[in-house]
Image (spheres, grey):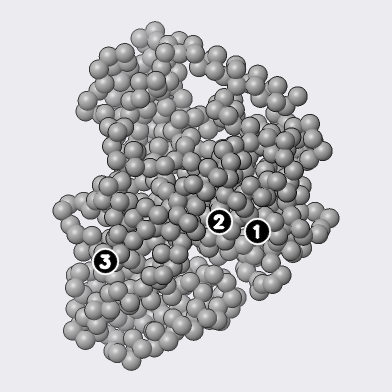
Amino acid sequence: MIAEELNRIAALEQEERSKYRHRMFVCMGTACMASHSDGIKAALEEELAKMGMEHDCAVCPGGCKGLCAAGPMVSIDPDNRLYQSVTAGDAAEIVASLDREPVERLAYPVESPFFTRQTRIVLSYGGKLNPDEIDDYIAEGGYEAALKALTEMTPAEVVEQITRSGLRGRGGAGYPTGLKWSTVAKAQGAHKYVICNGDEGDPGAFMDRSVMEASPHRVIEGMIIAAFAVGADRGYLYVRAEYPLAVKRLKQAIRQAQKQGLLGSNICGTPFSFDLDVRLGAGAFVCGEETALMASIEGKRGQPRPRPPYPAEAGLWGYPTLINNVETFANIAPIVNNGADWFAGIGTEKSKGTKVFALSGAIEHTGLIEVPMGITLREIVFEIGGGIPNGRKFKAVQTGGPSGGCIPEQYLDMPVDYESLNSIGSIMGSGGMIIMDETSCMVDVAKYFMDFCMNESCGKCIPCRVGTAQMSHILDKITRGEADLDDLATLERLCEMVKATSLCGLGQSAPNPVQSTLRYFRDEYLAHIVHHECPAGVCKMGVPT
């Protein structure tokens, strides 16, 4: 019954689309909304009505197109036109150009490396579908994977498919997704839960936010398949309250899926039932850690607990719980539709598929990209990212956020995968990638991330609570030219102690930016300490706090 209904919805949506010669998609992600893209949409609709063309052209809200530096963006199908830095005042010119030559001053080349060098799976719908309408998603094959899993596969076959695909958790640690699913599937419990970790708190990271805003149904579909595979009957999307647009669209998508019988009791006419809800986080970075996240959902203070037991055995309210992040769930439906071998054929031997990165900092094309695992940093920074602005030199790239490390120029030709990044003292992380030029002081960068970790520490364990504060104090002394070599030695000892003895990943990884900058930019630390000067001219020597 559900299959026939999905086919009917898809046919009706395709028929509706065929009525229009053109479909305009206005980016309505957070970044473009901040630049009043809602006013652009209204201006386009008004201009079409004025020209009597409202029946020839539809104006639709779209998700993030990725190239945030050029927003707000408007795309036009089927002309394959893309306009950048659009304002409401451009509406008349854009409408007048339909079926004619494009508006050259606004046109952005769709054949640019930023788009052609990407391999989009998770971001495949960004900017091409209306995130507010389930019909749009269904018309593009949405929920076919869920239907296939529930009616043509057993839970064990779904787990086997995900395992063979080689998908690893995209939240940072890179744990094999299939192995995690199989552990939860084997666990015993009267109830089981599936949680989507949308608590994205890394500075410079906005991948999950954009996916939730642009493709909420893709995330929900992945959670439905996961719940079926592990035997869960309830799920939660945990999203920080600072993401109001993502929260709004997820809640709306859940209601739409429920109305179509894709959530709730006896989904797709099968015995499987699954309910899904959204839970808001208050913005504590530590709640990205899975045990702290579960405590928050339970209404407790978001603090981590010792493991074992692991969530797969005793998680939310003591029941077996599967936790994956947004990007991981967004990969599930494509894998089920296309097969494990298809996904495993992308990437490297140990790091399969693609990875979404948020490019920010000293780079021409700030925004979101999705690339195959194994691509080099040079290709990301200089081909896709457009290089360093203002003729400046590349200095380092920070991957993995506060948990990651700063990678120097000598590793630009290194492949980007889990093992390679770990080998040089950084991590993949959730996908933040901050590029720095020669105007950045690496000691100041380390201090920034240490201050972040210190402020975000929940305080439960002494190594993290006290250790991060002491490291921040020493780094502050170094940037003011008041430290000596004994302070540097103490800093290095503290890094080892905090990493080895902290309770959770926040404290265990907090020293990474310090250790990586000491490893590759030690001369800058010595310049501050011995010569009382900042080579980048950022730190003010001798200035009291």
Q: Residues within 10 Å of mark 1 (few under 14, many from 20)?
A: many
- Dot 1: element: helix
Within-10-Å neighbours for mark 3: few <14, some 14–19, many 20+: few
Q: Residue 545: in sight, yes or no?
A: no
User: What label sits on residue 410 in the rendered view?
Assistant: 3
| C-alpha span from label 1 to label 2 | 9 Å
Is 491 on the left or on the right of 296, as rendered?
Answer: left
In this rendering, the answer to whether 356 lies above or below 55 is below
Quick one: 146 or 279, which is closer to the camera? Answer: 146
The residue lying toward the viewer, choosing from 109 and 481, is: 109
The amino acid pointed to by label 2 is Gly
What kind of residue is marked 1?
Lys
Q: Secondary structure at mark 2?
A: loop
Q: Would residue 318 be found to the left or right of residue 302 on screen?
A: right
Residue at the spot of label 2: 169
Q: Give the distance between the C-alpha atoms of the residues marked 2 and 3, in whole angstroms.
A: 28 Å
Q: Do residues under tags 1 and 2 come within 8 Å of each other at their CB atoms?
A: yes
Q: Which residue is mark 1?
A: 180
36 above or below 476? above
Dot placed on the residue nearer the N-terminal end, 2 or 3? 2
In the image, is residue 99 above or below residue 471?
Answer: above
